[in-house]
Image: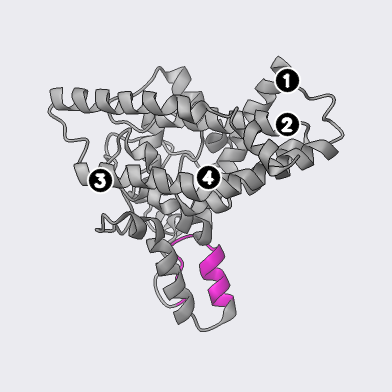
């Protein structure tokens, strides 16, 4: 398959193009409802930054997405399961589960490895949570994202199936970025990633840091010990542990790479530089260890599952 053929096939993956008008209508509806309730959920400059991140991430993602499509195609061609796993209903169900597990691993890695966090942090840089914030995509993470999905074509899933499922997963995640929905019925809260669970994910409170990484399902967080329930006794504080003040989209997209570079330059050894790159955000060679798990251990009485 040459590049022209790949581009033609990728055009079939048009869910994002279809979804964008729905996203815009949903944002307008949320603004209207918030105004009726006299709630200040949106701020003009903040929303413009979110839209800028969407455009920047789409531009940065183009070549990695094309390369990933070609890689998925090649890996699918050598898969011993390619003639067994086609587009049966059970294959879509299985792919949904495996894709969501892959997204969990990708998302958790973005919070656990500082080099990856530098590409994801822009998504958490707003001190507000609304449907516009959902469009504030991490720009740098587009460079490494698809590496996490390389195992799926080896299981027999074709490239277009995988890209379609990735898009459906992201489509679902748009709707959990809101304060207007409080809690869903308990059975759904136990299984799905909901607005309540995702508010926790965007929190800077120590109780909530680095929790609830699931895409559609929250069962992975419950299984792997990264789940935290929203606690009415501790309202969510959105943003970063150290918020940035700039509304410059380029700075929002790159500020953590700049901070990481500065930390690597002042490190004394190559081991310390590697630790800055691959340990979780908050580790320092010459100061307090402020990684999320360390901060939680230092505050007895925190039970994130309540």
Q: Is residue 190 visible?
A: yes
Snapshot quadrant of residue 230: top left
> Residue 181's x, y, as percent?
31, 24
Foreground: disc 4 or disc 1:
1
> What secondary structure is marked by label 1?
loop
Looking at the rendered structure, the secondary structure element under dot 4 is helix
Distance between mark 4 and mark 2 Cα atoms: 23 Å
Residue for point 56% across, 63% down: 278
Location of the N terminus (image quadrant): top right
Mark linked to residue 87: 1
Q: Residue furthest right?
A: 80
- Of labels 3 and 2, earlier in sequence is 3
Report which residue position mark 4 lands on.
Answer: 107
Which residues, given as a range, are shown in magenta? 271-285
For residue 217, above or below residue 90: below
For the residues carrying marks 3 and 4, which lies nearer the camera in this image?
Answer: 3
Mark 3 or mark 1: whose residue is earlier in sequence: 3
Q: Report if the CB atoms under discs 1 and 2 are less than 8 Å apart.
A: yes
Dot label at residue 46: 3
Where does the image place residue 41, in percent across and percent down from the top left? Answer: 21, 35
Q: Is residue 154 magenta?
A: no
> Where does label 2 land, which residue?
158
Q: Is residue 142 left or right of residue 67?
A: left
Instruction: Report the residue at 45% width, 31% height from top.
Output: 173
Nearest the viewer among 100 and 251 is 251
Number of other residues with Cα within 10 Å of mark 3, as a class: few under 14, some 14 to 19, many 20 or more: many
Looking at the picture, tell me which residue is in the foreground, 85 or 215: 85
Which residue corresponds to the image point at 12% horizontal and 28% vertical from the top-left?
38
């Amino acid at each position: 398959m040459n590049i022209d053929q790949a581009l033609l096939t990728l055009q079939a993956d048009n869910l994002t193009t279809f979804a964008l008008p729905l996203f815009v209508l949903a944002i307008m509806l949320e603004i209207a409802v918030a105004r009726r309730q006299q709630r200040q959920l949106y701020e003009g400059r903040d929303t413009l930054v979110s839209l800028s991140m969407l455009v920047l991430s789409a531009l940065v993602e183009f070549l990695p997405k094309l390369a990933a499509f070609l890689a998925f195609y090649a890996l699918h061609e050598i898969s011993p399961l390619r003639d067994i796993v086609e587009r049966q209903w059970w294959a879509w169900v299985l792919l949904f589960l495996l894709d969501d597990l892959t997204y969990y691993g990708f998302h958790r890695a973005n919070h656990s490895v500082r080099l990856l966090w530098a590409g994801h942090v822009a998504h958490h840089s707003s001190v507000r949570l609304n449907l516009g914030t959902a469009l504030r995509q991490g720009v740098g993470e587009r460079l490494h994202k698809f590496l996490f999905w390389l195992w799926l074509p080896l299981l027999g899933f074709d490239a277009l199936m995988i890209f379609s499922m990735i898009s459906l997963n992201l489509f679902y995640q748009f709707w959990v970025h809101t304060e207007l929905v409080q809690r869903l019925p308990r059975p759904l809260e136990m299984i799905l990633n909901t607005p309540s669970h995702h508010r926790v994910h965007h929190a800077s409170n120590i109780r909530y840091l680095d929790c609830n990484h699931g895409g559609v399902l929250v069962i992975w967080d419950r299984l792997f010990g990264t789940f935290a329930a929203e606690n009415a006794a501790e309202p969510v504080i959105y943003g970063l542990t150290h918020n940035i003040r700039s509304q410059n989209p380029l700075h929002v997209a790159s500020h953590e790479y700049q901070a990481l570079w500065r930390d690597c330059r002042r490190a004394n050894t190559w081991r310390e530089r590697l630790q800055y790159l691959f340990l979780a955000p908050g580790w320092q060679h010459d100061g307090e260890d402020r990684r999320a798990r360390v901060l939680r251990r230092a505050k007895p009485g925190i039970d994130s599952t309540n």
